[in-house]
Amino acid sequence: MRKALQVLVLLVPWPLWAQSAPTVDELVKEALKVNPSVEELRLRLAEARVNEVPAGTLPDPMVDFMLTDARFPRFTVGKEEMSMLGVTVRQDLRYPGKLSSREKQAQAETGVRELELARLKAEVVAAIRETYAELYALDVELEKVEEALDLLQVLKETAQARYAAGFTSQEAAVKAVLIKTRLQERKADLARQRAELVAMLNRLCNRPLNSPLGPVRGLPPYPPLPQNWQDLALEQAPEVKVMQAEVAAAAREVEVAKAELKPNLFATAGLGTRGSFGAVATLGFGLEWPFWRERKQKPELEAAQLRLKAAQARLEAVRAAVREEIEKTQAAWRNAQEQQTRYQQEILPLAMAALEAARATFLTGQVDFSTVIEDFNLWLEAEVGFAQRQAQAFAAWARISLLLGDSGGES
């Protein structure tokens, strides 16, 4: 029984018996969970959040131990009134507003990391959806090539029988063999293309080397697009939101640089002993003046302002790129929808009718084999073309979802 099953598996074309691929949503969920690039940005986001607290915290205090000896090298503490042994603590302070500006800058950097993670998730989701659509088109083509080989075998036997009976030339039988060989060549090329797409999905899902993926038997329905999706994309595109956060972070950096023009403060407190002469306490307060501000703080402020302007210019460039992508994707979406309708209503029915008519008239000797082959190729290309149009529509929807910041349902 087991041998018979193995023979059956070998005889039945691969797409018909192989276990189906996971759904696209299952692959998306898997990738967002294990993709190493996503995990890297998750960790960088966690790092940025941890850095927020230190950014708004004062520097560590410094402790100095002090010995004042009036008759050094003799130890005279308790014997000389001027000799003393003590400890001093110094705490560097910050001019009011400096710590809060640094904390806000750290929070702005965290905002950048959050949006970078959201952007990467959306890109991974879109890449999986587009690759899945390409796999669907390839798997349909592989299935149709298998069907075409079966149909061609029937045509080949018919041509050979007609040649043996003297109703047609040997050319028909030779052409049938040639077309079969070309189809086998096409099948091998499709298998190579499929292996490349599976390798891409394996990378996105961080799967082991040569992990198999069954045939994609269909594409899921996708929800209707918002009527104003183009306007939404201009504001919600992940790349735009990341650059907006970069601009905000650069603006916070300018605030920090401006605050550094102000002096820093420090306070000191000390306690010493003079032995039998009694204890000594000291208190102090001072400024760390930005004496070299023309050569240090002001150039740093100017550099921060230039980085802000550069970030603003980059934001405008990103918005222009998003507008271009919206126009291209909109054209691809409309074209795919129109072409699907054309295939369903015209091309597929006409191609099938032409092939059936050619087969029937060939059997009665009214047309030659070349006409049958021509209609056979038209039918095959129509079947494959329809699947490709379906894949193109799904891929266009995936790109629009990317522009809208869709991260596969993950927040």
Image (tube, helix red, strand yellow):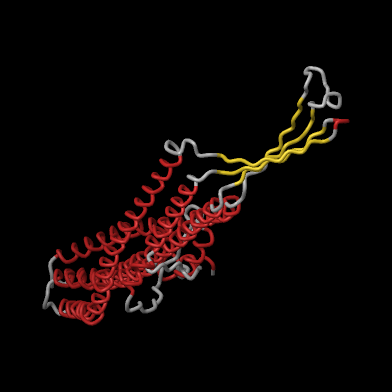
**Image quadrant of residue 73?**
top right
**Image quadrant of residue 318?**
bottom left
Lateral position of residue 393 relative to residue 24, left or right: left
Q: Is residue 293 above or below residue 239?
A: above
Q: Which residue occupies 26% across, 59% down?
A: 181
Lateral position of residue 79 relative to residue 188, left or right: right
- Can residue 216 be seen in the rendering of this structure? yes
Q: Which residue occupies 24% across, 78% down?
A: 348
Q: Is residue 86 above or below residue 334?
A: above
Q: Is residue 161 above or below residue 315?
A: below
Q: Relative to the observer, which residue lies in front, 320 or 26?
A: 320
Q: Position of residue 9 (x, y in %)?
A: 45, 67
Lateral position of residue 205 relative to residue 268, left or right: left
Q: Which residue occupies 23% across, 81% down?
A: 349
Q: Relative to the observer, which residue lies in front, 153 or 105?
A: 105
Q: Position of residue 131 (x, y in %)?
A: 38, 63
